[in-house]
Image (spheres, rainbow, N blue to C red):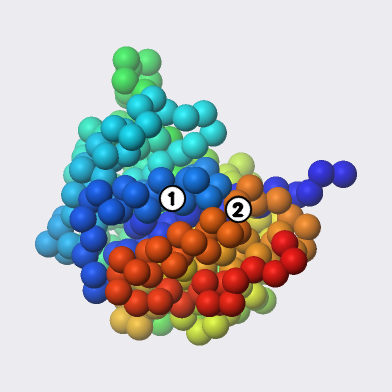
């Protein structure tokens, strides 16, 4: 029997770098993408189409995508470069580049939604509905429309509104499923989840949108990230986000430190017999390389200790 595949979506070039003090130029960020793809990343969140005044680390998304297009020309089958957007303006920008997918970020709570993108939950759903409608109206157009996914932030807790209930999550996931969103990410933006609550919210989300693929996004702020990823896999989830080196966080969520490290997650899964498609040694080299660029060692365990027995 073949090993069960677990897809790890690499988010280091976006969610990883957006919370770093260092502001890297587009050429360096494009090189990070290509290094990660050489290490086995097949879906990678390469850029974010946000206002540079809000997140200066993500300025120059168009230049990053242009540099990537210049390196390898036509799209590669089985590879997807993703652009994050917060609103319709960001979506318009994304359409003007070579992104293969657009990931729309929404919040489960009004507090974080207003802080992150100036929209409460109802306004965010309306924004996503407009994007979905525009996509339907563009069916048959000469220019291919990028794929679409959505990620819900603060699923396990909000720095402004506090605890988030299972019902809140299920209701919003159900709305996204009804819109036809085929992949819905559940993000522990501030790293407050635990494995048992992960299981409960996955079960509720799956019941609310049974046709959608669930993708889980964990932060290791309180040292539960890998345990939460384990719980997600045990609950049947096959798609997880991770960031090379464990870098990242959210500049609009106080205390929200790094993501689960891609190499730490790959090590755990490969040791357990799952297939990720990543080259662990190449991932560790990429983590150390980006650590040099941001001016500090990356926090992942594998970037310090190295792999063993995989």
Disc 1/disc 2 C-alpha distance (Å): 11 Å
* Residue of label 1: 35
Question: Residue 310 in the image: x percent, y percent?
Answer: 72, 62
Q: Give the side of residue 204 with respect to residue 170, left or right.
A: right
Q: Is residue 139 above or below residue 66?
A: above
Residue 242's disc is none
Question: Residue 276 in the image: x percent, y percent?
Answer: 65, 51
Q: Residue at 74% x, 55% y: name it.
A: 274
Q: Give the side of residue 218 with respect to residue 20, left or right.
A: right
The answer to whether residue 40 of the structure is visible from this angle is yes
Furthest-left residue in this view = 53
Q: Is residue 94 above or below residue 215?
A: above
Question: Residue 7 in the image: x percent, y percent?
Answer: 60, 50
Q: Residue at 82% x, 44% y: name it.
A: 2
Question: Residue 300 in the image: x percent, y percent?
Answer: 51, 74
Asked which quadrant contains residue 167, the reply is bottom right
Name the foreground residue: 295 vs 259.
Answer: 295
Mark earlier in primary sequence (1, 2): 1
Q: Give the side of residue 114 with respect to residue 182, left or right.
A: left
Q: Residue at 30% x, 69% y: name it.
A: 294
* Residue of label 2: 279
| Contact check, label 1 and label 2, Cβ < 8 Å | no
Asked which quadrant contains residue 196, the reply is bottom right
């Amino acid at each position: 029997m073949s090993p069960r595949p677990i897809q790890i979506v690499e988010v280091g070039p976006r969610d990883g770098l957006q919370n770093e003090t260092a502001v890297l130029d587009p050429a360096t960020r494009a090189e990070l993408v290509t290094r990660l793809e050489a290490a086995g990343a097949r879906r990678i969140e390469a850029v974010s189409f946000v206002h540079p005044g809000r997140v200066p680390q993500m300025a120059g998304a168009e230049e990053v995508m242009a540099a990537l297009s210049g390196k390898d020309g036509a799209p590669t089958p089985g590879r997807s470069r993703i652009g994050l957007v917060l609103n319709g303006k960001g979506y318009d920008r994304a359409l003007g580049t070579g992104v293969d997918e657009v990931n729309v970020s929404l919040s489960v709570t009004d507090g974080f939604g207003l802080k992150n993108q100036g929209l409460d939950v109802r306004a965010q759903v309306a924004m996503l509905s407009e994007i979905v409608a525009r996509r339907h109206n563009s069916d048959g157009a000469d220019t291919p429309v990028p794929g679409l996914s959505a990620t819900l932030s603060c699923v396990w807790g909000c720095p402004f509104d506090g605890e988030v209930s299972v019902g809140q999550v299920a209701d919003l996931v159900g709305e996204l499923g009804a819109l036809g969103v085929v992949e819905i990410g559940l993000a522990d933006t501030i790293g407050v989840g635990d494995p048992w609550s992960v299981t409960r919210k996955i079960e509720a989300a799956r019941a609310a949108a049974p046709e959608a693929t669930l993708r889980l996004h964990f932060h290791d702020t309180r040292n539960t990230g890998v345990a939460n990823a384990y719980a997600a896999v045990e609950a049947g989830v096959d798609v997880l986000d991770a960031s090379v080196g464990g870098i990242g966080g959210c500049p609009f969520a106080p205390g929200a430190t790094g993501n689960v490290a891609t190499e730490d997650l790959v090590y755990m899964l490969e040791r357990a017999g799952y297939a990720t498609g990543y080259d662990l040694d190449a991932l560790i080299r990429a983590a150390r390389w980006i650590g040099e660029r941001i001016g500090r060692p990356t926090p992942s365990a594998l970037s310090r200790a190295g792999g063993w027995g995989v």
